């Protein structure tokens, strides 16, 4: 009985010593379930308790600026570089990617297009229902970049702004029988719940790169800098990179690596 008590005390002490690590990330990545798979692997290997905040890239970066997160996993290159240049982060590593796709109702038929701008122009001119995340996420920023390149400012009843994450936005687009810009991974993860198809894909400008950023520990005395560095080591471990590469939903692999593990 005494041995059992000591064993329980040892495990309880080990658990209590685990330090919380706060990861702020984009909801489009969170919705795929990848982090649910990686979390127990990380916690088993390192003495940190991982808490994941699903916020969208824009808000995740704001959390980093305030020192309310230890590290970020985001996908908006221009904003990430600005974050680093302003000394909010001390380390940034891009390591995986998927891509954006434009999806819409399966019953809809449109001409073929040579670029995503041509499709957006067609949607704009014909006032076809379009659902926007409108949440300053990486996906929303990509959408707004395309409208800006066209010199268009979408508005009106056909342009539906959700302020929601990628999964909820896809469900709303499905309900409204509308088009939307989505990351392929979330679309694949929800494919069994929606009646939508891809209308445009495989354009180099729709590449969606994910980076991990360690927040500058000078932002707050609460920042778990050691834990953040441990998570970077974890992500770049060849075994974990292989796990990411092989991660699939509905039989489809969701992510590609920017470099092959050795």
Image (cartoon, rainbow, N blue to C red):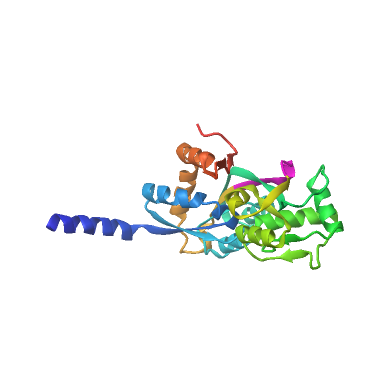
Residue in front for this viewpoint, 166 or 126: 126
Left or right of 258 in this view: 151: right
Left or right of residue 198, residue 253 in this image: left
Residue 210, horizontal then vertical, whole percent: 60, 48
**Residue extending farthest top:** 262
Q: Is residue 173 magenta?
A: no
Residue 238 appears in the rendering: yes
Q: Position of residue 226 (x, y in %)?
A: 44, 53
Q: Which residues are magenta?
A: 201-210
> Residue 208 colored magenta?
yes
The residue nearer to you, when weighing 102 against 42, is 102
Tell me if residue 88 can be seen. Answer: no
Q: Residue at x 79, y 64 (%)?
A: 158
- Taking the view exactly as shown, the residue that stands out farthest to the bottom is 157
| Residue at position x 27%, y 59% in the image | 12
Relative horizontal placement of residue 90, taking residue 103 as reference (left or right) = left
* Residue sitting nearer the eye, 148 or 64: 148
Which residue lies at the image location 83% right of the left edge and 60% below the top edge? 127
Q: Position of residue 142 (x, y in %)?
A: 72, 53
Residue at 70% of width from left, 63% of height from top?
134
Q: Quadrant of the N terminus?
A: bottom left
């Amino acid at each position: 009985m005494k041995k059992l008590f000591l064993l329980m005390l040892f495990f309880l002490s080990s658990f209590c010593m685990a330090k919380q690590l706060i990861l702020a990330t984009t909801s489009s990545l969170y919705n795929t379930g990848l982090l649910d798979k990686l979390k127990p692997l990380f916690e088993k290997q390192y003495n940190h308790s991982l808490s994941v905040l699903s916020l969208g890239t824009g808000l995740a970066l704001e959390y980093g600026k305030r020192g309310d997160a230890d590290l970020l996993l985001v996908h908006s290159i221009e904003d990430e570089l600005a974050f680093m240049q302003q000394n909010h982060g001390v380390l940034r590593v891009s390591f995986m990617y998927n891509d954006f796709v434009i999806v819409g109702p399966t019953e809809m038929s449109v001409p073929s297009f040579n670029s995503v701008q041509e499709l957006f122009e067609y949607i704009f001119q014909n006032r076809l229902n379009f659902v926007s995340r409108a949440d300053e996420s990486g996906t929303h920023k990509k959408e707004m970049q395309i409208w800006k390149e066209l010199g268009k400012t979408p508005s009106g009843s056909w342009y539906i702004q959700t302020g929601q994450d990628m999964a909820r936005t896809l469900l709303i687009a499905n309900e409204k029988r509308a088009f939307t810009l989505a990351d392929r991974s979330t679309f694949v993860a929800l494919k069994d719940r929606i009646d939508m198809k891809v209308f445009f894909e495989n354009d180099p400008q729709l590449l969606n790169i994910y980076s991990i950023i360690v927040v500058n520990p000078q932002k707050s005395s609460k920042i778990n800098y050691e834990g953040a560095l441990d998570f970077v080591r974890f992500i770049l471990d060849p075994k974990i990179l292989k796990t990411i590469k092989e991660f699939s939903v509905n039989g489809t692999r969701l992510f590609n690596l920017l470099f092959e593990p050795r």
